Amino acid sequence: MTALFSKDTVRRGIAAHSAIGLVCCALLYLICVSGTAIVLYEEWQRLEQPSAPEMESIAPQAVERAIANVAATEAGQTPTTHLYVHMPTEALPRTTVTTDTQAVHVDAQGAIAAPEENAWAEFLLGLHYTLNLPPVLGMTLVGMFGAMIVALAVSGIVAHPRIFRDAFRLRARRKDDVATLDWHNRLAVWTLPFALVIALTGAMIGLFYVSGASLAETAYDGDGDAALAPVFGAEPEGDAAPAPLPRVAPVLDYMDREYPGVRVSYLILHDPGTRGQHVQVVGEHERRLIFGEYYAFAADGSFKGTAGLADGETGQQFAASIYKLHFGNYGGLPVKIAYIVFGIALSVVVTTGTFIWLNKQARKGRPRPVIRAGWWGVTIGVPVAILATLLARLTLGNGAPFAAIFWLVTLAIVGGAILRSRQAGRRGALAPTRGFAP
């Protein structure tokens, strides 16, 4: 019977299949490494701009002055649709005002101190969130890879029935494939709860955009805000007629008086300078995993209620809890250190898993020297490229093209490793056999 494809075509198909698998593993590894680095998101911002004014707290009147000062710099421009005030927190003790067009640090009196310059931390966050792709596409891919980690973890347990019994059997000193297999299996067991939590929450965050957009299109006539209202609260009707900026000092005084155990992390002005404007406060609850509760206020400072993220439906509280659980920004520095250690271990699990597959292929007489070289390039290239972007930030400044630097360095290292492997293969093919060696 005649074969459907020639042997050369089949060989090329296998090579393409292996290359696609390598790309998927590389993206999974990139997500793990960048996720480990972004645990220190606030610390990276402080490293980038150490001269920004810091404070444990800021007076309500100073916040009001800061908003007025920033609004004055945008007079005559297209009005901003939102104005965010990042209040000082334990992790990031700075006050920052952000509009649609700018972000500035302010001092304890509310005066503008300097533009916010944290482009490298934002690049790192974007690399993990979207792989530097358009947001919907990137977050969809990241969500899918989160689901892939869950599948890999579960299938790995099923495929290795003795994996828990051998949890502390580590033959690290061996110089063969057994050491790689042991490192992979042991780290996989030790990090299993962490991997499942991170993967599940990552999949939820990533696929949230797809499911939210689909729900909006099918049930809410494309209105995304209406689709999210049952979870995060509804937006009031807008009115674009001009109006003075709202006074926020009474809002912060109300929070301090009525909710003394809640720490305000964000103050948000929706449609500021219009009759339809309203104020929203994000308040952090101590010893809770929720990122915060939304407290709604009218423009005159009257309290309108909460969204229910702290005490509403179970689904609401769960949805508000996945962010801290995923990024490890709860429990202070000890939790962050634990997330970094487990994140490094998970990255090693991904790396060794690919090497285990390559070793099996070699034992079957199907070595993949080019794929192996490419994988070594990925393993080394991703962290080196991240370090290169940090060095670019420290030497070239906030405007350095971080995404371009990262991908160029990564591809250069991977390409160099593959080229070196091909050259070594050609030298081996041209070398005389041992029986004919001089």
Image: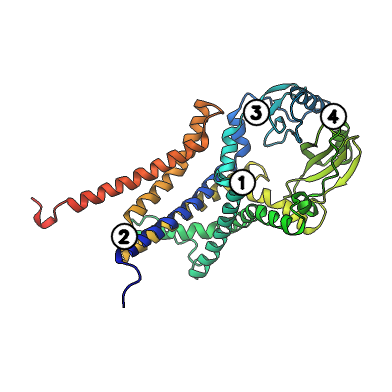
The kind of residue tagged 3 is Glu
For residue 180, side relative to residue 197 (left or right): left
Secondary element at image label 3: loop
Q: If you read the primary sequence from the N terminus, does the residue marked by circle 4 or circle 1 appear first?
A: 1
Residue 194 drawn at (x, y percent): 59, 55
Asked whether residue 387 appears in the rendered view, the answer is no
Residue 178 drawn at (x, y percent): 38, 61
Asked whether residue 71 appears in the rendered view, the answer is yes
Q: Residues within 10 Å of mark 2 (few under 14, many from 20)?
A: some
Where is 105 relative to 369, above or below? above
Report how far apart the C-alphas of labels 2 and 3 lie in the structure.
51 Å
Residue 109 drawn at (x, y percent): 77, 22
- In the rendered view, how is the structure colored? rainbow
Residue 135 — which label?
Answer: 1
Q: If you read the primary sequence from the N terminus, does the residue marked by circle 1 or circle 3 appear first?
A: 3
Secondary element at image label 1: helix
Residue 350 — which label?
Answer: none
In depth, the one of 429 and 44 nearer the eye is 429
Q: If you read the primary sequence from the N terminus, does the residue marked by circle 2 or circle 1 appear first?
A: 1
In depth, the one of 72 and 57 nearer the eye is 72
Hey, which quadrant is residue 98 in on the image? Answer: top right
The residue shown at (52%, 70%) is 158
Residue 367 — which label?
Answer: 2
Which residue is labeled 4 in the image? 245
Report how far apart the C-alphas of labels 2 and 4 lie in the structure.
68 Å
Report how far apart the C-alphas of labels 1 and 3 lie in the structure.
22 Å
Residue 116 — which label?
Answer: 3
Secondary element at image label 2: loop
Q: If you read the primary sequence from the N terminus, does the residue marked by circle 2 or circle 3 appear first?
A: 3
For residue 96, side relative to residue 164 (left or right): right
Task: Please tell me whether mark 4 or mark 3 is closer to you in this view.
Answer: 4
